[in-house]
Amino acid sequence: MNYNLLFENIESEINSLLDIGCYIGNFSGIFTDEFNLKNTNILCIDINPAYKELIESRGFRFRAVGLSSERKNIPVYYPKNPDSLFDPRNSGVSYCRENTIFFSDCVVSSQEVFPLDEISNSETFDFIKIDVQGAEYDVIDGGKETLKKSKYVLVETSCGDYNIGSKNEEKTIELLSSLGFKEKKVLEEIYIEEVLQQRDILFERMC
């Protein structure tokens, strides 16, 4: 993540953050330092409940919940025998299984997932980050009212087959456009074996 480029393109006052797919909370920590946010104005969400103690020890609120377009039970894919909580394979936990050797043999857990609008309790967030391993479209689809109240959305889009069952970037951009967001800056492009798989894109709400 090119944080300098991200911060250069945020022109509105930011007082709150919703970090969806927070992993170990590094994004929230860097973002908090840059904008001098109160920890109580930050909500971290991750489908993996293992991060609860770590995130809360950093002073952030944490919800262990999977997000989708509707409430339902679905299989969620976890790495088998991770070395520790900080094992990079843990960042790939999703219901859109990572299409790599690390998840060719994995642990499958049935979990209930929820729409973001159902669990956000009408709270307003100036900035929303969504990095959920291929499930970004579904999270946005289930959080339309929450997103409509935000100023910026940072999304990791899917351009290839890195996550099985993920919606492609074009559909995600179309959905955000329907909510009044316009693409502001591509922050990073991720290539694997010279094939573009993901992009981190900052969107700004225009209306």
Image (tube, helix red, strand yellow):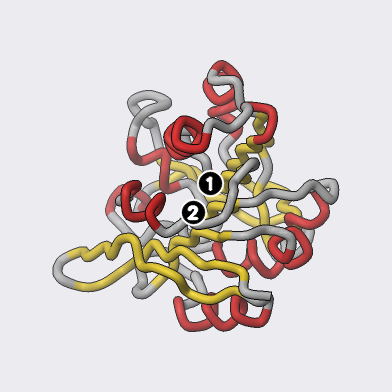
At x 65%, y 37%, the residue is 43
Disc 2, SS: loop
Disc ID at residue 44: none
Viewer-nearest residue: 198 or 100: 198
Q: Is residue 147 above or below residue 195?
A: above
- Residue 152 occupies which quadrant of the picture? bottom right
Report which quarter residue 44 is drawn in: top right
- Bin the neighbour count of mark 2 within 10 Å (Cα to Cα): few under 14, some 14-19, many 20 and up: many
Q: Cβ–Cβ below 8 Å for labels 1 and 2?
A: yes
Location of the C terminus by quadrant is bottom right
Where's residue 165, x and y in %?
Answer: 50, 71
Query: Looking at numbered disc 1 in the image, what kind of residue is underneath it?
Result: Gly
Mark 1 highlights which residue?
A: 21
Residue 4: percent from the left, percent from the top? 32, 48
Q: Secondary structure at mark 1?
A: loop
The one of 178 and 5 positioned closer to us in this rendering:
5
| First reached walking from the N terminus: tag 1 or tag 2 | 1
- Residue 42 in view here: yes
Q: Is residue 183 above or below residue 93?
A: below
| Residue at figure coordinates x 61%, y 78% from the top left | 175
Residue at image mark 2: 131
- Depth check: 21 or 9 in front? 9
Place of residue 111 in the rendered image (x, y in percent of width and height, measured from the top left): 68, 47
